[in-house]
Amino acid sequence: MAILLATDLDTVPGVEILRDEPMSKHTSFGIGGPADILALPHSPQALQELLRVCHAHGIRPIIIGNGTNVLVRDGGIRGVVIKLAENLSEIRRCGLNIEAQSGASLARLCVMAADWGLAGLGFAAGIPGSVGGAVWMNAGAWNQDIGSLVRQVEAFDLEGQPVVLDHGALKFSYRYSSLQDSDLVIVAVTFSLQEGNPRRLHAELCETIEKRCWKQPVAQASAGCIFKRPPCDFAGRLVEIVGGKGMRVGGAMISEKHANFIISDGTATARDVLELLEQVRTRVHEQEGIWLDPEVRVLGED
Ligand SMILES: Cc1cc2nc3c(=O)[nH]c(=O)nc-3n(C[C@H](O)[C@H](O)[C@H](O)COP(=O)(O)OP(=O)(O)OC[C@H]3O[C@@H](n4cnc5c(N)ncnc54)[C@H](O)[C@@H]3O)c2cc1C
């Protein structure tokens, strides 16, 4: 079955297939064992055909965008991973709307919106994911999130059938969209923005990025905030008051700069990160009575 699948995938036009591909090369953590097959579709049509072939073989692929909110375990991923970042990266303007393919970088979207004098995305500067990953996660910062700007999502189901969802159907809330309870693969997103001044919008992007560099360990390997914000509090504050800053397991450490970041010194394994995450969660629970909920998505096997 696996050999048949790999042979069939090789024949899908517009799809690059990598075998035994280390996922550490495709995650911002720089951690993760090999995926049996990593597929890189170069167009929506190629993605659709790829999904059909996987479905015909009874394979449920794992989707990633830019791998900036995932931790892949050390044993890697059996089966097929489809990576959308860098490919499927078209961005175009339609009046006050922008339509972006799901693999487009969120950073590039922010810059293009500012160039076009379209306001609303200033808060998202410096979030290193893809458009698809950002919408799936309802990424946000400084009390704003991307979901509020989404007008429509175009997706495929696992059989490659097109599905269109409007804002209401996506049920956005803090780091949640209804896509998380579906098998849909986001292909493109339409954002509704307002008119703005390009010079001021670019200045806003620079300020946001500066603020991030000042507050977060952006130069070190991580997956961003490791825990979601608990009701009426901040995960970073809780980790800090229980003395979490600087805690270490192997090559993984709680950042001294921002206590809600686990960073890797380049040698951390997924096992180190997960062990550290559990130690911190337990400490916060014992001392503050709150179980923190991880924001990072854990994929693959030990
Ligand atoms: C330094 C740093 C700073 C960060 N700052 C922030 C921040 O301020 N706010 C914030 O919210 N996040 C932040 N993050 C986390 C991360 O960048 C965001 O969650 C981002 O939106 C994830 O996008 P991605 O493309 O990397 O998704 P991935 O990590 O690749 O995937 C995340 C999830 O989305 C799913 N997914 C991705 N693309 C698709 C698709 N096209 N269709 C269906 N499912 C899909 C995946 O299956 C996975 O479950 C930060 C990360 C880092 C490393």
Image (tube, helix red, strand yellow):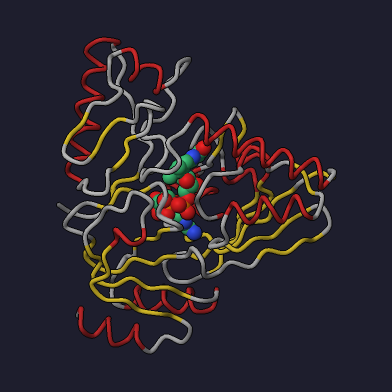
Q: Residue at x 23, y 64 (%)?
A: 34
Work out whether residue 258 can be spotted: yes
x, y percent for residue 281: 26, 24
Q: Nearer the viewer, residue 182 or 8?
A: 8
Q: Quadrant of the N terminus?
A: bottom left
Q: Is residue 182 above or below residue 259?
A: below
Number of numbered tags placed on the structure image: 0
Q: Is residue 202 above or below residue 185?
A: above
Q: Residue at x 49, y 37 (%)?
A: 175
Q: Nearer the viewer, residue 162 or 300?
A: 300
Image-quadrant location for residue 2: bottom left
Q: Residue at x 34, y 34 (%)?
A: 294
Work out whether residue 176 can be spotted: no
x, y percent for residue 192: 74, 48
Q: Is residue 195 left or right of residue 270?
A: right
Q: Is residue 244 left or right of residue 157?
A: left
x, y percent for residue 291: 29, 21
Q: Is residue 274 above or below residue 35?
A: above
Image-quadrant location for residue 190: bottom right
Q: Residue at x 21, y 21 (%)?
A: 282
Q: Nearer the viewer, residue 189 or 200?
A: 200
Q: Is residue 301 left or right of residue 96?
A: left
x, y percent for residue 145: 60, 37
Q: Is residue 140 left or right of residue 16?
A: right
